[in-house]
Amino acid sequence: MKLYLQSLLFFLVLSSCSNELNFENKMFSKKSTLLCKQNCTEIKVAIPIAKSNSLAADSINKKVFSIVKELVYLEEKPLTKENYEELVSSFIQSFENTKEAFPDSTFGWEANIQGTVKYQSENLINIEIDHYTFTGGAHGYEGIQSLLFDPKTGKTIPNDNLFKNTAELKKMVEKKFRIKYQIPLVGNINQTGYLFEDNTFQLPKNILFTNEGLLFHYNQYEAAAYVEGPKTLFIPYTSLKNYLVVK
C-alpha cells in the first residue's frame, strides 16, 4: 500500500511538471532578394511558444498564431497557412508576386512582430504582441495586442471577465485619463480633440498586466488621431482592489 501511494504521488508530481506552461521564444524571418538596395522586403516574427504536452498549451499556441496571421495579412485570410515557416514565406511570395505585376513599384514591404509573455500567474497568462506591418500607403499599421489566457484551459479571458463594478471602474479610469491628458473633468471627453466613439469614454481593448498594476493601452486611432500616437494609463493594483477579479 505504501509503495502504491509513493508511486501515485510520483505520478502526480510528474504529471504536474509535464503540464506546467513554460514558453520558448522562437524567431522566424525571411528576406526578399528583389528591390533590395535600400528598401529590402523582410519579415521578422519573434514569438513565445508554449512548451507542454497539454491542451492548454495547444490552445494558446493556436490562438497566438491566428492573431499573428491576421496581423501579417491585414486584408487577406491565408487559411491554408498552418505554421510560422509557411507564413513568413507566404509574405515574401506575396510581395514578389506584386512586384512582378507592378515592376515600377519602388517600395519594399516590412513586417515586424514581437511577442512577449508580459505576466504569468496561476490564474492568468498575458502575452503582448507588438506589431508593425507596411505593404504600401502613407504609413504602416502598428500597435499592440494584449492576449489574456486561462493557464488551466488555454482559453482566452475576455476583458469583461477581469472586473466587477465595471461602471464605477470606468468612471475612475476616465477621471485619471482626463487628468493625465489635461482634459477638463467636466464636459465632453472629446472636447480637446480626442476621438472616443459617440463622445463617450471607453476602456481600451488592450489591457496589460504587470507586477505592479494594469496598463490601459489605446492604439493609434482608438482614442486619438494617428499623429497623436498611442495613449496609455497605468493604474496600480492598490487602486484596483475593488474592481479586479482575475490577477
Image (cartoon, rainbow, N blue to C red):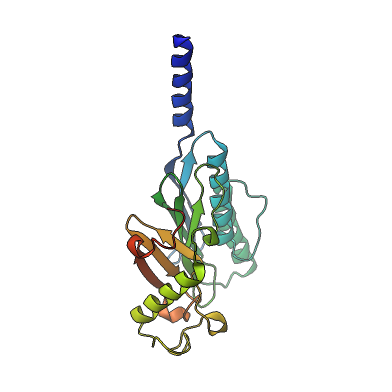
Residue 156 left/right relative to 176: right
Q: Residue at x 51, y 47 (%)?
A: 150
Q: Is residue 213 left or right of residue 191?
A: left
Rendering coords of residue 143 (x, y %): 46, 67
Residue 243 is at least partly visible in this image:
yes
* Between 163 and 50, the one nearer to me in the picture: 163
Labels in figure, total = 0
For residue 108, say whether it is visible. no
Q: Image point 62% across, 46% down: which residue? A: 82
Image location of residue 158, percent across then percent down: 55, 58
Residue shown at 43% from the left, 42% from the top: 23
Q: Position of residue 110 (x, y in %)?
A: 49, 63
Taking the image as shown, residue 104 lies to the left or right of residue 13, namely right
The image quarter containing residue 215 is bottom left
Task: Decide: is 78 above or below 179.
Answer: above
- Viewer-closest of 111 and 98: 111
The image shows residue 98, relative to residue 119, as above or below, that is: below
User: Where's residue 22, x and y in %?
Assistant: 43, 39
**Front one among 24 and 30:** 24
Foreground of the two, 183 or 8: 8
